[in-house]
Amino acid sequence: MSQWQLVALDLDGTLLDPAGTISSENRKWIKIAQQSGLEVTIATGRPLRMMKSFLDLLEIRAPYVVANGSEVWAPPNQLLERHLFETKDIEYLLQLAKEYGTHFWSSVVDHVFETGQFPDDAGRYQWLKFGYQSSDQKIMKEIWDRLHARGNLEVSSSDPTNIEVNPYGVTKATGLQTVCDQLGIQAERVVTIGDGLNDISMMRWSGMAIAMENARHQVKAVADRQTVHHAKDGVAAALRALLRD
């Protein structure tokens, strides 16, 4: 029997191609992995509302992680875990976005705010995640440093132009631990595949970490293996190699 029981896939820059779709080759090898006895799941920074089509397409049976770990769900619609910001932290994150003039977005339970929109009363809503976006690396570095200095926020990134913030201690790794608790799987039996800084927590936590060719150098530094570019069916290549182990 293979030593691996679960494969957890990031979406953007990993499973999804540059057009934001799942290639037929990646779908084929995910199906082969499932038929071989491997559970396959998703661990993404995306909110739940942006997940359903991918979950249906891949016929995901295992619990999955959204919003960088702020929520864990089991199919078809069972909430297993949810972590929320305190209102004062959300108000601070908004103030910082206004101060630096960056684009910003948020993941909110049961509500959708358009990018750059914010309610007058933040306390009326349940906040899962907050994000900043700017091509000005100096500004992003200053925001990153100030968020870290605050000391009670989980700060990561899925792209060089963004910063993603979660409640302190909430990561893809903590979300996947909940998945494993549900499935009765140990972390050392898990393979994680990703490309962004928000994938580092789960890659350090898992028994095998695979970085995409297009991954940031910090991600490659913690990986056990590397696969090809997400534009060239890198997930399929990684699964082929795993099934040969």
Image (cartoon, rainbow, N blue to C red):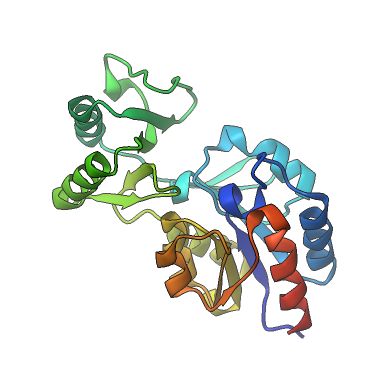
Q: Position of residue 10 (x, y in %)?
A: 57, 54
Q: Position of residue 47 (x, y in %)?
A: 52, 37
Left or right: 154 as drawn, with respect to 4: left
Q: Is residue 185 visible?
A: no
Q: Quadrant of the N terminus?
A: bottom right
At 69% from the left and 69% from the top, the residue drawn is: 238
Left or right: 35 as drawn, with respect to 94: right
Q: Position of residue 65 (x, y in %)?
A: 54, 51
Marker count (numbered)? 0
Q: Considering only vertical position in the picture, is 28 above or below 100?
A: below
Corner quadrant of residue 50: top right
- Looking at this view, is 31 or 177 the one in front? 31
At 68% from the left and 52% from the top, the residue drawn is: 231
Left or right: 61 as drawn, with respect to 174: right
At 71% from the left and 44% from the top, the residue drawn is: 55
Q: Quadrant of the C terminus?
A: bottom right
Q: Position of residue 33 (x, y in %)?
A: 79, 67
Corner quadrant of residue 21: top right
Q: Considering only vertical position in the picture, is 86 above or below 205?
A: above
- Looking at this view, is 142 or 56 the one in front? 142
At 43% from the left and 55% from the top, the residue drawn is: 198
Q: Residue furthest top?
A: 120
Q: Is residue 92 visible?
A: yes
Q: Considering only vertical position in the picture, is 155 above or below 130?
A: below
